[in-house]
Image (cartoon, helix red, strand yellow):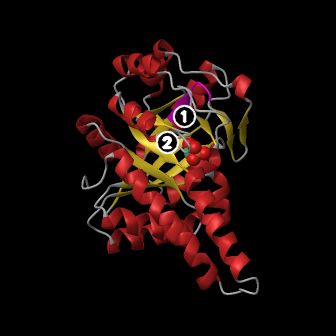
Amino acid sequence: MLVTTKGLLVKAQKEHYAVPAFNIHNLETFRVVVETASALNSPVIIAGTPGTIEYSGEDYLIAIAKEAAAKHNNIPIAMHLDHFEDVERLKHCIDVGFTSAMIDASRMSFDDNIKVTREVVEYAHLSGTVVEAELGMLGGREENVVVDEKDAMYTNPDAAKEFVERTGIDSLAVAIGTAHGLYKGEPKLDFERLKEIREKVDVPLVLHGASDVPENLVKRAIELGICKVNIATDLKIPFSDAVKEYFKEHPDANDPRNYMTPGKEAMKEIVIKKIKMCGSEGRA
Ligand code: 13P
């Protein structure tokens, strides 16, 4: 079933688990995520950044999603646009059939972030598409969005309340100490801040940059109100490492069906781990 993230996240919020959002890049990674989620009876969010949409094609991805939803009708699947900054591009992808959209205007001023986000909300809600936005700023790199650690900015709980009220968003991405990509040391998550945001804001909260964060910290964040957990880097690395390893052992390999397979298998293990970490197994 192809659904929006709204019902998925509201249920997760009520029942205190999180729905994993996995960034995919192509048919292979798409299938690993959906087939694994289906085997574990877990709701799942398929996420694509602007670069992925450009690479795979929005219409191809939606066609794959429809097929996946029909084949795996034991689980709800949401198609999510991740970290879009270009409003027109975002609107186009909504028209094509994505069910959930993140507008990332977090690099703008508070008022401009509200203005741009509000515009997307008004457009998306016409077709029942739901909207995630970010307040505060995560460090690290997610494609073209590069934020130096010193410029990263935590989400202010009072501002978060005002932001949600004025934009009408369906879920809020918070900056509480995670970053995109790998960490230099152990990340420090500001749980007090998360608690305060949870008290002031009633929409589902989203944790970006959840790769390479110790499991106990992600679980604690879920206990405190996170209900969507974004994973990209932790899938890309094992996939690529397994393919590299395959080429090391088979330097003459040239059949994608052979060299992609170990990548898919390595990725599957991580998808299982993350679903279990989120507590979404059996929640479809
Ligand atoms: P990671 O780099 O931690 O996987 O971040 C994923 C993410 O937040 C995508 O929006």
Image quadrant where residue 204 sits: top left
In depth, the one of 136 and 165 nearer the eye is 136
Q: Which residues fall within the magenta stretch?
A: 133-137
Whether the magenta-drawn stretch holds residue 183 is answered as no
Magenta span: chief secondary structure: strand
Q: Is mark 2 within 8 Å of ligand 1?
A: no
In the image, residue 99 sits, relative to residue 167, either above or below, namely below
Name the residue located 56 percent from the left edge and 74 percent from the top edge.
262
Label 2 near label 1: C-beta < 8 Å? Answer: yes
Disc number placed over residue 119 in the picture, else none: 1
Q: Looking at the rendering, in which quadrant would you find the C terminus?
A: bottom left
Residue at label 2? Answer: 123
Q: Is residue 54 left or right of residue 69?
A: right
- Kind of element beneath mark 2: helix
Name the residue located 71 percent from the left edge and 28 percent from the top edge.
149
In depth, the one of 14 and 238 nearer the eye is 238
Q: Position of residue 133 (x, y in %)?
A: 52, 34
Name the residue located 48 percent from the left edge and 58 percent from the top edge.
270
